[in-house]
Amino acid sequence: MQAQNLPFNPAALDAFVALVGEPVWRVRIADIVGRAASGPRLGQEVRQRHGLELAIERLRRTPARPPTEAELRAAQLANYTVALYRRLGVRGKARLRQRIALALTGDETLLPLFHLLRNAELQQGRGFEVSFAGLDSGAPFDLLISRGSVQAEVVCDVISAEEGRLVHRRAWSHLTDLVAADLRDWLPGNPGRYLLKLTVAQGLRLGEAGALEDMRLRISRLLHNKGRRDDNGAAVLRLDPLILAHPVDEPSLLNLLRADFGPEAHLAVTTNGASIFAMAARAGRVDEVAVAVRERLAAIAPDRLTGQRPGILAMFVEDTDRREWRGLRDRLELEGEARQFLAGTAARPVIAVTCASRCEMFGMPVPHAAEDGELRFRNPAHPAAKAAALAPAVLSSV
């Protein structure tokens, strides 16, 4: 298939990889693939987290295969990166290459860079002239947008929803992979349907390997001792029969459990023939994702904005799924916390806060994604709040 017949530019993908070097890229992809093989559930989390890198690699290796919408969006942003690199000066080029190199290290991702590029696209589409002040001149903010004589500084920042959770999703995925391995030996000798309820008072995090192994051992002891309850200060475990009115497949069972345990519950199902072992975990408190966003806003505003121009804090909320993201919007949690921030002294240079997620980045339709590509909350107390030239970038969207 000829490049001109493809919905993306394969040469631009190769040029993107060349910015850090083909050997570095190969090592990175091999590392992601290796981590994704660590277990079925944790592997799925790894593939989702590093979906941008994997999408670029798939398109490079199999360009004739029709791309998904997410893959096409990854290719477009990679293309934008290459085009931007060619326009930047010497120092800007060096800073961009440093950002890409960092994005391909450890647990980092391309999302912060692509969030920056997507915000530039949004503002250009609204009629603003956009300069990459952070890359070009080392400014503390990322973008300088202007229309006529009016300018605004834009800070593009990424926060993980995990910062507002006691039980981290990747930690839960790792734990359930460990338990599923144990259940492969236990379930054949103990056929039936089981529901293990966990109340995790002190939380569960991926970096706390000892806590994960301790929880695994507690579950294993409970099963092998044929117990019903294990209680300590860290978590309460309760094993009950799983009562089902009729046979259901795994997706339907997960939906039933979600209805019973609520949107914040962490769920997993392991089967062996007709036997079923379901796990449902709740943290010791409700998730505070929107609170974590507010705290991040307060932390970055003084350091990233100069106060010489109106400032926009453009937040990307990572590690949410469509259900959680819509819930944060529908329950007005993000709006409430953003407006609480805007009412404080730290928000004096801030004219607006915006929030987006993967749903907006990858072009999912409403209601999964917010209209106009982001949520916006204007600060009515800012002196430039009613400036007509800035309205498309700052007017509240809800």
Image (cartoon, rainbow, N blue to C red):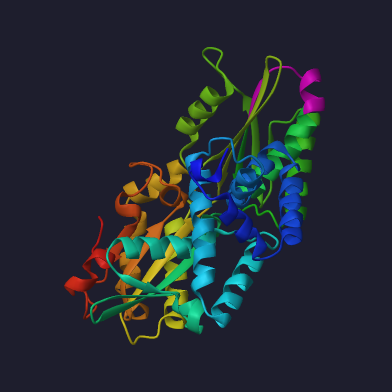
| On-image quarter of the C terminus | bottom left
Residue 168, position as x, y percentages in the image:
60, 51
From the viewer's perspective, is 125 left or right of 235? left
Identify the residue at horizontal 76%, vertical 22% (top origin): 187
Question: Of 10 and 387, which appears nearest the observer?
Answer: 10
Which residue: 76% across, 29% down? 183
Residue 131 visible somewhere in the drawing: yes
Where in the figure is residue 96, as x and y percent of width and height? 57, 72
Residue 218, percent across and down? 76, 41
Which residue extends farthest top? Answer: 246
Say whether residue 190 is magenta.
yes
Q: Position of residue 88 (x, y in %)?
A: 51, 76
Determine whether 329 is above or below 281 in the image.
below
Quarter of the image where one finds residue 40: top right
| Relative height, residue 227 to residue 329 (above, below) | above
Q: Which residues are magenta?
A: 184-195
**Residue 315 shown in magenta:** no
Rendered position, 318 above or below 342? above
Taking depth in this image into account, of 99 and 338 the one nearest to the observer is 99
Residue 36 placement, left or right of 139: right
Quadrant placement of the N terminus: top right
